[in-house]
Each structure stands twice: as structure tokens, then as C-alpha cells.
Image (cartoon, helix red, strand yellow):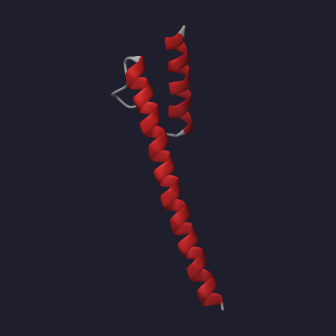
Amino acid sequence: MVIKYFASVYWATVTCTTVGYGDITPTNMYEIWWAMVIMGFGVGVFSLFLSDMASQFADILNKTNL
């Protein structure tokens, strides 16, 4: 029962983060947990990078329009 829960949460995480299923997949609960942690960390770092770039572009546009 717990394995089915982790598998469904893993599927939702992979789908929502648009990582994709790939050829190599986790096979036990420990690997599934680590894969979800790594996906969450990757999405967080990517969104931090994009928000920083958007902020810099907004500052550049505000300086040039003055």
C-alpha cells in the first residue's frame, strides 16, 4: 500500500515538474524519495534563476525609460 502511494506521488511529481520519465527510473522507495527531492530542488533553483533574470531585466527597462 505504501509503495503504491509513493509511486503515485512520484508520478505526480514527475508530471508536474515536466522532467519526463526517461529510460532510468527509481526502483525502490528510497530511490523514489531521492528522485522527488532532486526534482523539487532542481525546479526551485531554476525558478530562482529565472526570477532573478526577470528582476534584472525589469531594472534595466526601468532605467532606460527614465
Left or right: where does residue 12 sit relative to residue 27? Answer: right
Quadrant, the N terminus = top right
Toward the viewer: 20 or 46? 46
Return the x and y of residue 36 as percentages of the image width and height: 46, 32
**Residue, x 52% and y 11% (percent of image)?**
2
Query: Residue sitting at 56 percent across and 29 percent down?
Result: 12
Residue 54, image x, y percentages: 56, 68
Instruction: Judge whether 45 appears above or below 58 on screen.
Output: above
> Which quadrant of the structure image shows residue 23?
top left
Among all residues in the image, which is located at the extreme top? 1
The answer to whether 47 is drawn above or below residue 7 in the figure is below
Q: Is residue 23 left or right of residue 45?
A: left
Q: Residue at x 50, y 33 (%)?
A: 14
Seen from this angle, which residue lies furthest bottom? 66
Q: Locate residue 24, reporting x and y percent.
A: 33, 27
- Residue at the image position 55 percent from the left and 20 percent from the top: 8
Q: Is residue 52 visible?
A: yes
Across and down, in percent, residue 39 comes to 45, 39
Q: Is residue 20 visible?
A: no
Q: Give whichever of 27, 48 is nearer the camera.
A: 48
* Position of 41 relative to 27 (above/below): below
Front residue of 58/34: it is 34
Q: Quadrant of residue 62?
A: bottom right
Quadrant housing the C terminus: bottom right
Image position of 46 with respect to 66: above or below = above
Most extreme residue toward the right, as rendered? 66
